[in-house]
């Protein structure tokens, strides 16, 4: 699925009421950004924002932050919020590798929804479930570690099961075909996911945690 280039993306981002500019200044103060002490969940690679927007609307007592590197996708996510008032949602346009400069130990759950799979062996360190990123997550989780992943890519899914297991995560839920699973796993649907369902692709899902 291709995204259109948004010509005025920088202006949309800069003037948005929902996007946090200079997010490093909010490190260790994200509860103050939201004005409450509710749990904070972070989606890395939010794309057009459909998942994080729907999650915030569905769970008003949880705070959600969507992070996206691409300016056009971030601008589209902002536009998709439109006139809705969603006080428990914020967005960031930044690199996921910079999260330790943006957050202290403040995050309760990390969502990885249809992240870039980086299927080639040479690129495996770029995957959001590689050991490099798991070590970064250690520094921003509030206490217990909790990662939820959805993907249509077998290589990313298999490598994620392996890397998370090697890192002592346990799996609370695993599905090889999320939307045809006999168990009802409640989750909001992303833009990619909606298209993949129409195409009949299986969606892989895992819910992993490490309780301290």
Image: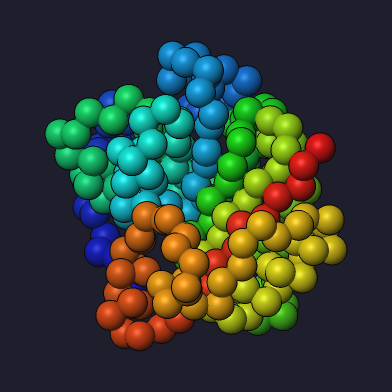
Total marks in image: 0
- The quarter of the image holding the C terminus is top right
* Vertical side of 29 occupied by 21: above or below: below
Name the one closer to the observer, 160 or 187: 187
* Residue 74 can be seen in this image: no
* Residue 159 can be seen in this image: yes
Q: Is residue 171 left or right of residue 4?
A: right
Q: In the image, residue 104 lies at what x, y percent? A: 67, 27
Q: Is residue 114 left or right of residue 160?
A: left
Task: Identify the coloring.
Answer: rainbow
Q: Quadrant of residue 197?
A: bottom left
Residue drawn 25% across and 64% down?
Answer: 4
Q: In the image, residue 10 lies at what x, y percent? A: 30, 41
Q: Quadrant of residue 187?
A: bottom left
Q: Is residue 27 left or right of residue 63?
A: right
* Vertical side of 101 occupied by 98: above or below: below
Residue drawn 30% across and 74% down?
Answer: 195
Residue drawn 38% across and 44% down?
Answer: 55
Q: In the image, residue 145 lies at what x, y percent? A: 71, 43
């Amino acid at each position: 699925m291709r995204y259109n280039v948004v010509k005025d993306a920088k202006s949309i981002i800069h003037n948005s009421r929902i996007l946090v500019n200079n997010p490093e200044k909010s490190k260790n103060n994200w509860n103050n950004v939201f004005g409450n002490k509710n749990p904070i969940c972070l989606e890395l690679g939010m794309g057009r924002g459909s998942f994080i927007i729907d999650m915030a609307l569905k769970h008003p007592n949880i705070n959600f932050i969507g992070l996206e590197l691409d300016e056009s996708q971030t601008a589209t996510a902002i536009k998709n919020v439109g006139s809705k008032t969603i006080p428990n949602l914020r967005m960031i346009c930044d690199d996921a590798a910079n999260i330790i400069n943006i957050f202290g130990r403040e995050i309760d759950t990390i969502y990885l929804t249809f992240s870039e799979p980086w299927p080639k062996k040479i690129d495996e360190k770029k995957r959001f479930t590689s050991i490099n990123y798991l070590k970064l997550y250690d520094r921003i989780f509030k206490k217990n570690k909790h990662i939820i992943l959805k993907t249509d890519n077998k290589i990313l899914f298999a490598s994620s099961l392996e890397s998370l297991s090697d890192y002592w995560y346990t799996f609370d839920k695993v599905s090889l075909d999320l939307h045809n699973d006999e168990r009802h796993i409640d989750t909001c649907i992303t833009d990619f996911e909606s298209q993949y369902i129409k195409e009949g692709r299986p969606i892989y899902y895992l819910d992993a945690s490490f309780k301290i």
